Every structure is written in structure tokens, then in C-alpha cells.
Amino acid sequence: MSSFLYIHLLIMILASILYLITSIIGILDRGDKRLNIHLYTGMITDILFILGFFHLIIENRLYPAFTHFYLAITFFVVLGIILLLGLIYKFMKVKNKFKIRKLHRFLSLFGVIFLILTLITGIRLIL
């Protein structure tokens, strides 16, 4: 396995673990007591995923022919919407924050599903 794959794997596995930790913090948080921790771990997670993606671009290793690519793109879109909803919930003056939080949590569940599928297809590429 090339050093390129090790770097990509390291970044993406770290980001995936942080995504799951961030999700658990969000699930267990009642009354927004850990909202700032959830926010910061989520932002670090997003930055790591973006770094992993840009690493592919820099190395010229984007292969749209693989299922892993399309699952990853779908995951990134869902992740972007989740991030946007979370930031709206935290910083905007919105009448009904409950609906935004509910949608944020619902999409986060889909994010976990797409993350697992993306990880499985990514691992299958290197084995």
C-alpha cells in the first residue's frame, strides 16, 4: 500500500471516529449542556473530512468510477446540510428551533449510515 493511501486512511479514520463521537455527544446531550463540545468536535470532523478529500485532489486520485466516490460525495452533501442546520440552531434567531434540531438529528443518522457504507466500500478498494 502506498504512502498516499496511509495518509488518506489515517485522515478519514480519524474523522470517522470523531464523527461518531460527535454524534454520541449530540444524542446524549439533554438541555444543550454539551452543545459547544458537540459544535467544536463537529467542526474539527468536517475539517478533517475536507482535508481527506483535498488530499485526493492534490494527489490526483479521484476516481468517479468507484462506488466509494459516489457514496463519499453523498456523505459530504449530507454532512454539509447537517453542519448548516447545526449552525442555524446555534447562532440564528429562529422561531421554531425544535424542528431544526429534529432535522439535524435525523440527517445525522443518515450521515452515520452513509459513513459506514463509504468506509466499507473504501476498505474493499484497498483489500
Image (tube, rainbow, N blue to C red):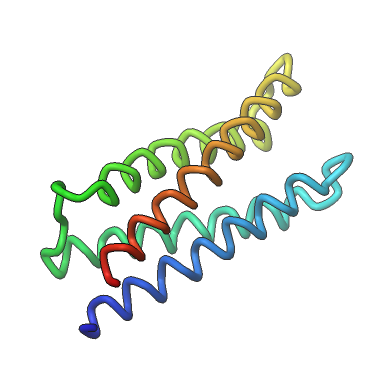
Left or right, residue 19 beside residue 4: right
User: Is residue 87 placed above or below 123 in the rendered structure?
Assistant: above
Q: Which quadrant, please, contains the N terminus?
A: bottom left
In front: 70, or 39? 70
* Relative image position of residue 38 (x, y in whole percent): 69, 53
Q: Residue at x 70, y 29 (%)?
A: 101
In the image, residue 1 sits, relative to residue 34, either above or below, namely below
Q: Provide residue 76's location: percent of width, then percent of height.
A: 39, 44
* Left or right: residue 123 compared with residue 81: left
Q: Residue furthest top?
A: 95
Quadrant position of the C terminus in the picture: bottom left
- Point 44% across, 59% down: residue: 47
Depth check: give the residue in front, 50 or 63.
63
x and y percent of residue 16 in the render? 51, 61
Residue farthest left in this picture: 60
Q: Relative to 66, does residue 123 appear above or below in the rendering?
A: below
Q: Quadrant of residue 125?
A: bottom left
Q: Which residue is drawn at 50% across and 70% down?
A: 14
Number of numbered discs: 0
Tell which of 41 and 66 is nearer to you.
66
Residue in view at x 66 percent, y 24 percent: 100
Q: Is residue 71 above or below residue 40?
A: above
